[in-house]
Structure formats: C-alpha cells, structure tokens
Amino acid sequence: MNKKLNTIDSHKLCVAPMLDWTDRHCRYFHRLISSQVMLYTEMVTAPAILRGDRDKYIGFSPEENPVAIQLGGSDAKDLATCARIAEDYGYSEVNLNVGCPSDRVQKGRFGACLMKEPELVAECYEAMASAVDIPITIKSRIGVDEQDSFEAFNHFIQVVKQSGCETFIVHARNALLKGLSPKQNRHVPPLKYDYAYRLKAENPELNVVLNGGINTVADAETHWQKNDGIMVGRAFWNAPWLIRDMHDAAGMKAMSSDKDDVLQAYKHYCTEQIAQGSSLHWLIRPILGLFHGEMGNKKYKSYLVTEAPRRKDDVAVLDEARAFVTEKQTTEEMTC
Ligand SMILES: Cc1cc2nc3c(=O)[nH]c(=O)nc-3n(C[C@H](O)[C@H](O)[C@H](O)COP(=O)(O)O)c2cc1C
C-alpha cells in the first residue's frame, strides 16, 4: 500500500483544478480565505513541464501550500520525472487528470480516455509513486462513453487501487468523448453521486472525494456523511467566500479575517506581483465574486473590469471598487 501520508483530512475540502481559472493568483487569494482548503493547479501537461517554460507553468508562491499540481499525460516515465520536479518545487501532492474530455487531450491519449485503460493508469501511478514521497492522487470521471455502469467504474478503480493508489477524486459524471464539448461535459451527463457513495461503502480504506454540482453548505454536509471529502469548482469561482462558509462547516481552524481583511491582503499581493510584471487586469479575476449576493456587487465588478485594464498597475482600483458595496442584501431584497 501507499507509504504516503494519510490524506483523509487534507481532502475534506478541495478547490477543483480549473484551466485558465485556478492560476497562482487565484490560489493565493483562496488561501487567504481558508488556511486549510486543499488547492489544485490547472492541468499542466507533462511535455509542457519537460520542454516548456517551467517556471511559467508551475512556479507558485509557497504561501499557497498545501497545493497539488495536476498533471496531464500517460507516459509513465515522463510523469515520474514531472512528479519529481513538482516535489522539488515544493508541491504537496501530484494529481493525475483522468477526467478531461477535450479533443486535444484525447489526441494526446490522456484525460478521460484513460478510463478505458486502467492498467496504463496503474502503471503511471506506480511510476510516480515510486519517484516521490508526496502523495499521488487520481481525479477521474465515473465512466466514459458507453462504459457507464458502476461495475465498469469499479473495475477501473480496483485495477488502479492494486498499484497502491488510495485517494480518488471522483467527478460523478460520465464523459462523452464524441459530440459534447468540454463545457457540455460538465453539465449534460447526469450526476450519479451513488457511484461515489457505493465506492466508499465497499472500499472504506480508500479516500473518496466527491466532485460535481456541489453548490451549498447543505450539499457539502450531505456528501461529507458518505464520502471523505468534497471538491468544488464553479461555485467557488462564482462566490469565493463560500470557501470560508464550507471551511467553517468542515470544522477547520477558526479564521478571524473578514472580506475586507482578505481584500487588503490581496491588494498587497497585487502590488508585489505588479512589481514582478503582472497586470492588474489579470490579477482582479479571482476577486470578482468576493461580494457575491451583496448590495453594490454588480457595480463593484463592473468597476474592476473597466478600470483594471486602463490602470494596469494601480491597486487603488480595488478600494475604489469596494466602495460600491454597501451592505448585505436581505432575503427580501434578493427575491424582489
Ligand atoms: C473553466 C474550467 C476549467 C476546468 N479545468 C479542469 C482541469 O484543468 N482539470 C480538471 O481535472 N478538471 C477541470 N475542470 C473540471 C472541474 O475540476 C470540475 O471537475 C467540474 O467543474 C465539476 O465540478 P463543479 O460542478 O464543482 O464545477 C474545469 C472546469 C471548468 C469550469
């Protein structure tokens, strides 16, 4: 079995890897909101790490930890090399993508199509696990194309489990490789949470982390009863303060900072990043949803998206935008 640390608690609450969204700035911002949520990078392919501008693809701030790097690939030797590089960079975990359905990814023979090749995934897992001391985890779908039964999903898991893998993050939808875009593949195939629940019930020794369509604290509480953890993507992007609500509901270490403290800390980070060549235009993306549901939120957002591109290095834009937010909307106001 995997000699790596027990990852049950560290996966109770995770922010999903999201290409073009969960970049290092977004992760830094999320870390300000929760000291314990597990963060994931966007998927980075093995060739990009081996042959591309490595610091650009995988550089990150140590303050983001614990952060997992998500790899895309299916060449066991390359993945093992990338896992070693990631460990040297200071990542806390390596996650293998077995869920992305895009055409480009299929052509590279990785992502969701690997659900049809459990032996290859097991080989990749073994190569990575023997190369590093940090945990290796798998993020998969529950099936692909016509391979959509619980038995087929369970077969995939059992083969990979044999190689020593203990943590499976399950996006509880089938992936349809022909006819649906990646975006459609995130909402058209129905969610089947019972696959993940049954997986955990039949394999209590595994860490099973449920992903897909989790939008509220009540959803989180339901899933925590049946799985070890949850991973949330779009809901956290739209309303990042939900991370704090779930952090609190998960019983994680109490945090005293409020939204304004977080915004000020992020402003400080922006100043540092701008000095290193980043643009405010890019840096403001993760904070657009910070005041979701509050009065003035719309003006706050539109001020940021209009002013940040014009004043690329002026962090005062954040305070000016904040001034539009007045107070929390009451339920009555929200339903008007
Ligand atoms: C913009 C975007 C980019 C994504 N990129 C990745 C990715 O790089 N790797 C991955 O495993 N999943 C990726 N996903 C899928 C999410 O990690 C997650 O599995 C999916 O959105 C379902 O969770 P949710 O309903 O909480 O959003 C992406 C999703 C979105 C919306």
Image (cartoon, rainbow, N blue to C red):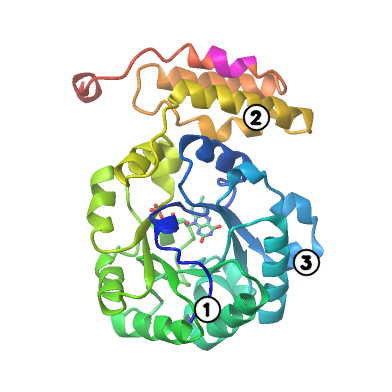
Point out the stretch of residues depicted in magenta: 316-320
On residue 269, the disc is 2
Which of the two discs, 1 and 2, sits closer to the camera?
2
List x then y, in percent, for residue 161.
Answer: 44, 82
Asked which secondary structure carries label 2, the reply is helix
The part of the image, by quadrant, that contains residue 103 is bottom right
3D distance between C-alphas at marks 3 and 2: 29 Å
List x then y, in percent, for residue 265.
Answer: 57, 26
List x then y, in percent, for residue 215.
Answer: 32, 46
| Disc on the earlier residue, 3 or 1 | 3
The C terminus lies in quadrant: top left
| Disc on the earlier residue, 1 or 2 | 1
Name the one closer to the observer, 196 or 324.
Answer: 196
List x then y, in percent, for residue 236.
Answer: 42, 42
What's the amino acid at mark 1? Leu
Q: Residues within 10 Å of mark 1 (few under 14, many from 20)?
A: many
Name the one closer to the observer, 307 or 142.
Answer: 142
Asked which secondary structure carries label 3, the reply is helix
Q: Residues within 10 Å of mark 3 (few under 14, many from 20)?
A: some
State the residue position of label 1: 114
Q: Residues within 10 Å of mark 2 (few under 14, many from 20)?
A: some
In the picture, measured across the screen, residue 208 lies left or right of residue 108, that is left
Label 3 with label 2: CB-CB less than 8 Å: no
What's the amino acid at mark 2? Tyr
What's the amino acid at mark 3? Leu
Q: Residue at x 41, y 25 (%)?
A: 291
Label 1 with label 2: CB-CB less than 8 Å: no
Label 2 within 8 A of ligand 1 by Cβ: no
Q: Residue at x 64, y 81 (%)?
A: 127
State the residue position of label 3: 50
